[in-house]
Image (cartoon, helix red, strand yellow):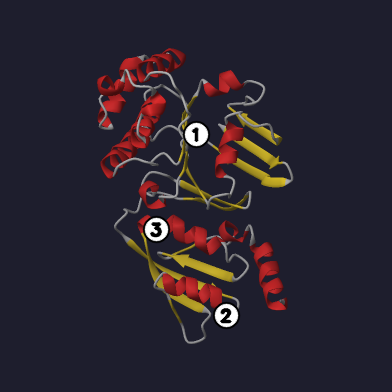
Amino acid sequence: MIRIDAVGKSFGRVSVLDGVSLSVREGERVALIGSNGAGKTTLIRCLLGEYSYAGEILVDGRSPRRERRAVLDGIGFVPQLPPPLKMPVSELVRFAGAVSRTGEANVAAVLARLGLDLADVAAKPFVKLSGGQKQKILAAIALGRDCKLLILDEPTANLDPAARKVLFDLLAERAERPMIISSHRIEEVAGLVNRVVEMDRGRIVLDERIEGTIGVAARQACTLTIRRVEPAFAKAMRDWGFRPSGSGLDWHGEVASADRMRFLALVARYGGLISAIELAGAALPLEAVASNSREEEQRHALGHAR
């Protein structure tokens, strides 16, 4: 479905993407996580063909740069920041329905489920709406069309709790479609995605597939074994409620299922320090957290040298 191969992107002298490679297959629902500036939105913009880039991206065998119209025809996209469109909402919905060939009725139906009546805002300029109203309309346009792929960049931004719940209900109804969801609210998508990818400084530092569903209320026992005692790691683990053994090299605790991906993203930062991980009785492959282990070792060494 999607193949991203050694993609790099710089703005001036600032490198934002550094050799990113990633494949997304049919049926995969990917949570794309990372701090601000990690490169998530830039990667999405490259995937949509908005930016030029080094390397190669293919969506269903097509290049987003060379065949952008054909690629976008199969994508439902919710941006992080609403565009400053001055056209009336009715015109925007009419245009979106015509482009996607799904009609206005589908968009209006999704919008109603999100708690916004199209008739109430139809005559208003899109740019004059509240942040929540804009986000609902953009989500309705993306989910109201028949597309092969959904890409959502911080889709819950500005949404009230009720609308956030409905949005994820809508996504769950489309679970057979591949999705890429960039979100800081990782606990909200934990029950929806089956893969988590973390970015940091323009690189992928964690890529884990999640088999089956555990239930967001469950807690999983976890044991981590480290190679040496590190104060920064100890503080991070204590913040999560973990406690060390007598030697200080084995750490034991529990992780709520809703926080599982966020916890693994944290663990990835200490890939060079961890020698073994056991979560809910299943030993995790260290490759999942070791992609940046060499860099972590170098950082530790530099820190001690200073």
> Helix or strand or loop: what does disc 2 sit on?
loop
Crowdedness near tag 2: few (<14), some (14–19) or many (≥20) residues, C-alpha within 10 Å: few
Q: Are marks 3 and 2 in contact (CB under 8 Å)?
A: no
Chain-order first, disc 2 or disc 1: 1
Amino acid carrying mark 1 in the image: Glu
Chain-order first, disc 3 or disc 2: 2
Chain-order first, disc 3 or disc 1: 1
Amino acid carrying mark 3 in the image: Asp
Crowdedness near tag 3: few (<14), some (14–19) or many (≥20) residues, C-alpha within 10 Å: some
* Residue in front for this viewpoint, 132 or 167: 132
Q: Are marks 3 and 1 in contact (CB under 8 Å)?
A: no
Image quadrant in which the N terminus is located: top right
According to the image, label 3 marks what residue?
Answer: 259
Image quadrant in which the C terminus is located: bottom right
> Helix or strand or loop: what does disc 1 sit on?
loop
* Residue in front for this viewpoint, 165 or 129: 129
Residue 140: x and y in percent read 36, 27
According to the image, label 1 marks what residue?
Answer: 26
130 left or right of 15 in image: left
According to the image, label 2 marks what residue?
Answer: 229
Residue 305's quadrant in the figure? bottom right
305 left or right of 138 in image: right
